[in-house]
Amino acid sequence: MYAVLQIPEFPLQAALRFCDPEMRNLPLAAVNAATKQGEVLAANAPARALGVGEGMPGAKALARCPDLRFVPACAKAEANTQALLLQTAGMLSPSVESTAPGVCTVDLRNIRGDARLEVARTLDALLSAQLVARAGVAPLPDLARLAAAKAEPLLLVQSAQDFLKKIPLPELSQDRRLLKTLQDWGVHTVMDLLALPRQEALERLGPEGMSLWTAAGGGQARPLRLETFPDTYEESLDFESPIETLEPLLFVLNRLLDSLCMRLESTRRAASNLSLTLHMEDGSPHGLSLQVPAPTAAPDVLRRILFSHIESLQLPHRATGVHLSIEPALQSPRQFDLFQTPLKDPNRFGETVAKLRALTVGGNLGVPAPADSHLPGDFNLQNPEAAFPQESPRQKELYSPAPGLPLRRMHPRQEIKVESNAGKPRFVYGTRFSGPVTECRGPYRISGHWWREDCWALEEWDVAVDCTSANFRERRGKFLARIGRDPSGNWHLEGVYHA
């Protein structure tokens, strides 16, 4: 058995997938904006009831239906809709053929369960994506396509002969000369054609008659041209008018994200990265790439990650269109270790980091990590990861802190004044403390980056200061600090030791 999934009025449905559902009740027609006359590519039922048909010039269609609304056909939207159709059809079987725009054929011979029920579920999945589809199930691919054209919305063909009796010849062939010849012969139905002597009829009708005869018999068994499921998960939408506020943008992104998540579920994939591109009114794009801490296909989780960044977005111009894409990854269940404490909800952690990043300025958020430099206290901020790496016992042994008192570095360093005697510090004056130096160790001279313009050198001392400042009441008496002097002779408080 084979199933054919067909999206009628494909250019129109592809263009209207993210529009207001109430708009579908109006007379609508998809037109080719690239042609001079605006040829009608597809029209919905209200428009066809008023005489609008495919191939009709736009002016003629508007004359027949003054209330007709034109929708420009979008090649990008049709490509995304075709990818959605193929990925949804993959829920039935991996053997899928992209037969035509808006049409795909599925091999159901190895399907388990009731084929009719499984196809009905696939149609419901397409309907949830704002696509009205129909399906035909038959023993042969070509016969299933004929059944799909007659389905409302699903048609199962048990007997090919009984089904073909109801099919008029113009639906099997578009060759007007051939149809005119058969009409002159008095042949109007499929049964009239099959009643003719086959050999003599084909000698007079030629190759076109052979194709019609094969179609009238239900087609022939043929191998499907199997498609590799597209590994692209993209959705685009051009706004009818530029938008300025955040609410309509979030509304559109919500619809796009739901569609992409449905496609991820149908192919058993998860999202590992979100890429958002906003097209500005001046023609420039504004891009945003978001890493998903733990790959998932849950729309609620992805919505929180995306909206957390969008809420603080400031655009220089109004947006005229949006493009949202997802980088897929395999869904891999995560097993927790008994001796580790990873994050329970990495995506919730990523959402919190996104909110904190929106509150900070200049990227001052991250996990501090030592920089590749010998400059004391030099570090870089790395992006917080969803799951922090766990150190092995051997790593903890190698990188265990050196024995001694911990030093709390000052960031930024505080300027101080130091009185020296015989090259050693004897008294320290600072905004936070002042006092005589009772004991000192040093100097410890270090330098680096001598080959660069930002080379540095530092002379450090460890000093014991008798603190007399009221700001250090908790440290009455002596406390230990590290001070440093640069080549210009300026002294700084580098840090304070904690006993």
Image (spheres, rainbow, N blue to C red):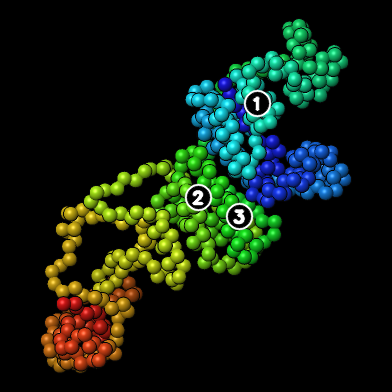
The image position of residue 190, as x and y in percent, is 75, 16
Residue receiving disc 3:
252
Q: Nearer the viewer, residue 422 or 476?
A: 476
Give the x, y percent position of residue 491.
Answer: 26, 86
- x and y, in percent, of residue 135 in the image: 63, 30
Q: Is residue 313 above or below residue 291?
A: below
- Between label 2 and label 3, give the one nearer the viewer: 2
Instruction: Name the residue that disc number 1 marks.
Output: 155
Query: In which quadrant will I find the C terminus?
Result: bottom left
Q: Give the mark, 3 or 1, whose residue is nearer the N terminus.
A: 1
Q: Amino acid at mark 2?
A: Pro
Q: Nearer the viewer, residue 14 or 209?
A: 14
Q: Nearer the viewer, residue 464 or 22?
A: 22
> Is label 2 in a helix, a strand or a loop?
helix
Circle 2 packing at 10 Å, graded few (<14), some (14-19), many (20+), is some
Whether tag 1 and tag 2 are in contact, CB under 8 A, the answer is: no
Separation of marks 2 and 3 at Cα, in angstroms: 14 Å
Left or right of 58 on screen, residue 255: left
Which element carries disc 1, helix, strand or loop?
strand
Question: In x, y percent, where is residue 494?
Answer: 25, 80
The label number, if any, that marks residue 299 in the structure image: 2
Say whether marks 3 and 1 touch (CB < 8 Å): no
Residue type pointed to by label 3: Val
Q: Upstream in the sequence, badge 1 or badge 2? A: 1
- The mark closer to the camera, 3 or 1, is 1
